[in-house]
């Protein structure tokens, strides 16, 4: 089983308007609602690719109910911890002449609910995959990624990490199966600006030396790089298309890569991951199966 963890899932409310006039009433010309968070995005794209997963994390209030029902309708199994107070966050994005975002804070997570979450980790078994993705709410311990890996460290589990600088660096000692920074995040980890694919390969190799088994780096319009556990370097170019959406493209790449590892080698996994990331970038929402495989055949 593949488990994805999203500590602070959200309802993403997207509003399209011709023009926004501050200080007055504005009206939308189109509205969209998506249910997400990095781990949930991975689960949703895995479902499109026919790979089952279980989404873990915390939900609260009427928005939490909507998130749970929404992802379940999209064929994702959930095992969320339900909080007694507050509500899961709402992220508002206004698309007009200027794009504006306002992201909610999310509910407080008390200690007893954190302990309930850790008990759910006892269900994880050998040969399962655990995806740790996204930031950590202020009400959770800043080292919760490490606490999770300590908890499941006695099992033979593939760990995938897609997170911010310190969160990722701090888990390398656990030898995760895969880490996926983008090229900007990779540069920030080492305090450098990466100017070429050779630079990306150089610093991705440092992450391998620090413990990562496989390092996948997304580079937006410049494609992607994979340094695999067999010592091979794979470089794929980017797809050409009309970029409509950057939200969830990296999560989609992670999902495609995991799905590819289920049924092929690392080169196949990179190709499928790159196709899934591009399919999301070229869509209003997350990638759909037909779009992923249409692009896959083109690469």
Image (tube, grey):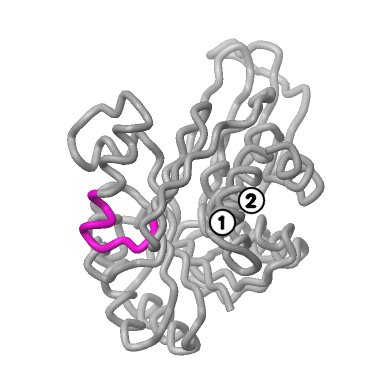
Q: In which quarter of the image is residue 156?
A: bottom left
Judged from the image, the secondary structure of the residue bearing numbered disc 1 is: helix
Q: Can residue 153 be seen in this view?
A: yes
- Left-right relation of 295 to 35: right
Crowd rating for badge 2 (residues with CA inside 10 Å; few <14, some 14–19, many 20+): many
Q: In which quarter of the image is the N terminus?
A: bottom right
Question: Magenta span has 213?
Answer: yes
- Residue 153 drawn above or below residue 220: below
- Left-right relation of 221 to 195: right
Q: Name the residue under label 1.
A: 257
- Residue 75 drawn above or below residue 29: below
The structure residue drawn at horizontal position 32% and vertical position 75%, both measured from the top left corner, is 149
Q: Quadrant of the C terminus?
A: top right
Q: Name the residue under label 2.
A: 272
Crowd rating for badge 1 (residues with CA inside 10 Å; few <14, some 14–19, many 20+): many
User: Residue 163: horizontal and vertical position, in percent?
Assistant: 37, 52
Which residue range is magenta in the image? 206-214
Q: Say which label, 1 or 2, has the lower sequence index.
A: 1
User: Residue 13: horizontal and vertical position, in percent?
Assistant: 64, 39
Q: Nearer the viewer, residue 269 or 88?
A: 269
- Left-right relation of 297 to 40: right
The structure residue drawn at horizontal position 71% and vertical position 13%, both measured from the top left corner, is 18
- Left-right relation of 173 to 54: left
Q: Which residue lies furthest to the right in this view?
A: 290
Q: Cα distance, mark 1 to mark 2?
A: 6 Å
């Amino acid at each position: 089983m593949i488990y994805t963890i999203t500590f602070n899932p959200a309802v993403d409310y997207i509003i399209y308007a011709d023009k926004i006039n501050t200080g007055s009433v504005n009206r939308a010309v189109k509205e969209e609602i998506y249910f997400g968070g990095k781990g949930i995005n991975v689960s949703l794209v895995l479902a499109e690719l026919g790979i089952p997963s279980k989404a873990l994390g915390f939900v609260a209030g009427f928005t939490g109910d909507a998130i749970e029902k929404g992802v379940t309708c999209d064929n994702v199994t959930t095992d969320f911890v339900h909080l007694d107070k507050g509500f899961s966050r709402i992220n508002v994005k206004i698309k007009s002449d200027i794009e504006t975002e306002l992201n909610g804070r999310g509910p407080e997570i008390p200690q007893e609910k954190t302990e309930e979450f850790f008990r759910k980790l006892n269900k994880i078994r050998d040969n399962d995959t655990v995806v740790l993705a996204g930031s950590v709410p202020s009400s959770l311990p800043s080292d919760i990624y490490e606490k999770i890996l300590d908890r499941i460290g006695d099992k033979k589990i593939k760990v995938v990490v897609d997170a911010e600088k310190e969160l990722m660096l701090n888990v390398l000692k656990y030898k995760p199966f895969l880490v996926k920074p983008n090229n900007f995040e990779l540069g920030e980890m080492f305090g450098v600006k990466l100017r070429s694919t050779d630079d990306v390969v150089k610093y991705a190799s440092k992450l391998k030396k620090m413990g990562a088994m496989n390092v996948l780096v997304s580079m937006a319009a410049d494609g992607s790089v994979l340094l695999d556990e067999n010592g091979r370097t794979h470089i794929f170019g980017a797809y050409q298309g009309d970029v409509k959406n950057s939200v969830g493209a990296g999560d989609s790449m992670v999902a495609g890569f995991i799905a590819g590892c289920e049924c092929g080698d690392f080169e196949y996994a990179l190709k499928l991951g790159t196709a899934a990331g591009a399919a999301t970038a070229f869509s209003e929402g997350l990638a759909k199966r037909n779009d992923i495989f249409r692009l896959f055949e083109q690469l």
